[in-house]
Image: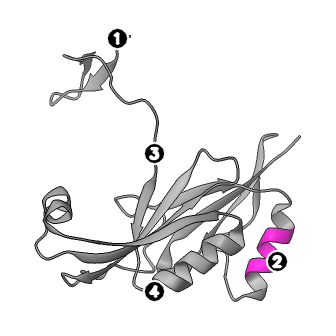
Amino acid sequence: MRSACVCGSGRLGPTIVQMTIQRMDHVGVVVEDLAAATAFFVELGLELQGEAPVEGRWVDRVVGLEGVRAEIAMLQTPDGYGRLELAKFHTPASRSGDRNAPANTLGIRHVAFVVEDIDAVVAGLRARGVELVGELERYEDSYRLCYVRGPEGIIVELAEQIS
């Protein structure tokens, strides 16, 4: 398989090596309150695969920090294909971000999930104090979708496929 990359010049060109990615494994999100974030995503429908402490020289070397002591929770979508890793760093101290950053802020900005009955999901979230970022809208004949702001400012896109 030949693939293309965006080179320093901004032009597309052939890559030097074959593409080695087999699949996306998970997305990691750093949080302050691991229990609350885990509970939010479990209530949304993700399944908790496990929780574990993470520390030691090996993790220091992997993440490029010294003295890492953290806890992680790994969650999985019901279909078994998508995973979300939530991490709480005890040490070193984390830098705080803008929890109210708008959707067009540079960087990873949201996590998206396909849901059944988006109206019921949104109503359930609103009953727990979660607010929409914008509005629930229809995208052509494909999806009804919206953004909600989850724990610690995480933007979660919810999408219901239209039959």
Say which label, 2 or 3, has the lower sequence index: 3
**Label 4's element?**
loop
**Label 1's element?**
loop
**Residue 151, horizontal then vertical, whole percent:** 54, 80
Q: In the image, 19: left or right of 99?
A: left
Q: CA distance from mark 4 to mark 2?
A: 24 Å
On the question of residue 139 being in view, the answer is: no
Say which label, 4 or 2, has the lower sequence index: 4
Q: Residue at x 41, y 78 (%)?
A: 31
Please identify the residue farthest to the top as the structure is shown: 1
In the rendered image, residue 123 lying in the magenta stretch gets the answer yes
Say which label, 4 or 1, has the lower sequence index: 1
- The N terminus - image quarter: top left
What are the residue bounds of the magenta stretch? 120-125
**Label 3's element?**
loop
**Residue 17, horizontal then vertical, whole percent:** 22, 17
- The C terminus - image quarter: top right
